[in-house]
Image (cartoon, rainbow, N blue to C red):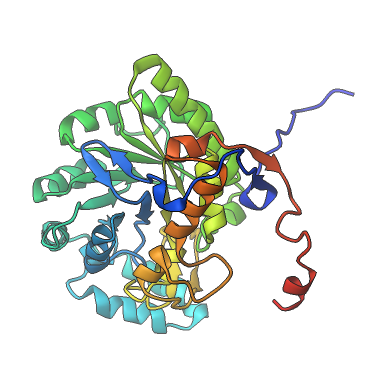
Amino acid sequence: MLQFKEIRRAYGFDEVAIVPGQVTINPDQTNIEFQLGPHRFAIPFLASAMDAVVSPSFAIAMGKAGGLAVLNLEGVWTRYEDADAVLQQVVQAPQEEVTALLQKIYSAPIKEHLIGQRIQEVKGGGVVCAVAVTPQNTKRLAPLAVEAGADILVVQATVTTARHISKSYRGLIFSELVQQVKVPVIVGNCVTYSAALELMETGIHGILVGVGPGAACTTREVVGVGVPQVTATMDCAAAREEYYRQTGRYVAVITDGGMRTGGEVCKAFVSGADAVMLGTPFAQAQEAPGRGYNWGMATSHPALPRGTRVKVGIKGTLQEILFGPSQVTDGTMNLVGALRVGMGMVGAFTIRDFQRAELVYAPDIKMEGKTYQMAQR
């Protein structure tokens, strides 16, 4: 019988496990530094460009912790002088009213003077400043951001490709953008080998991997588009390796979303990631502006929202979430410690070593022998 099409098996974090190595090393001997252009970060963790996650003050705290936070230049921080008051409205709104409220809030125009002001607030903290814009606003906002002192530019949409067809005479061309802004450019989001390779060929410095895996995103439910993060990361990492083989230029692969625990973070790196971008785990920090809530970047779409406000609670300080000490046993705190321990178990001194660790298909790995734990949850 003829088939209309074949379906390829794809894997998510819950379906795979990392195989221990033949040699183990002390976790404190691991090197987890992350390089992006001229910038070197002590830890390979980025905070998502979500209004409930990154404020200027959070970006400073994240930078001082050794990571990188990305500020959304199309969010409340550039639309309102008093963004905290607006966030308080979102937090206090009844669930049945919050989407309409977000649509109203994000319909306010972006105030260009606030772009420079917010960037200077971050830079005033003595850390690297990364900002995010959508493709449709990049030509207008990117030059303003770089002129104001932004060190890294993230161009981000639900799905981003190097070839976009539209009615405009001349759309956004990433190769020209890279030459224009003269700062490292990260582009996302992408989940396939071919699209990742084409994006890398434009000269960008990093690529975000993930469509719809975030806890506050509903893209997969609304339009059915997405690829599980393990497979998506492996495919984009394969593109990175091929591009590096061809050119000698290394483009960072950053797995974006879908990770809640240290185990999932480790699996992202073994799948090929150079760094990870987290939203909800950082929204649970005391320093996050969302006050225990988070919502997707596409939640406020005027016609087809693809996100929702979720109550995530406050788990601890940013320091505790990143470095511990952990007050819980579910792997949601001390993410850096978990990464180092995981690397030690497979004998990986560096992230590149960790990427070479073996993964196995193991859909029952979380429940095997855990009858009593599951009964208590």
Q: In this view, does 193 lie to the left or right of 178?
A: right
Horizontal side, residue 88 vs residue 14: left or right: left
Between 296 and 170, the one lying in front of the other is 296
Say which quadrant the C terminus sits in. bottom right
Identify the residue shown where x is 39% and y is 22%: 244
User: Residue 259 location in percent, x, y?
Assistant: 52, 56
- Percent coordinates x, y for residue 143 in the rendering: 15, 42
264 lies left or right of 43: right
Camera sees residue 303: no
Q: Where is residue 215 in the image (x, y as percent from the top left)?
A: 53, 62
In the depicted view, which residue is nearer to us: 97 or 244?
A: 244
- Between 207 and 33, the residue placed more toward the observer is 33
Can residue 77 be spotted in the picture?
A: yes
Q: In this view, does 340 lie above or below 87?
A: above
Q: Quadrant of residue 106?
A: bottom left
Quadrant of image for the N terminus: top right
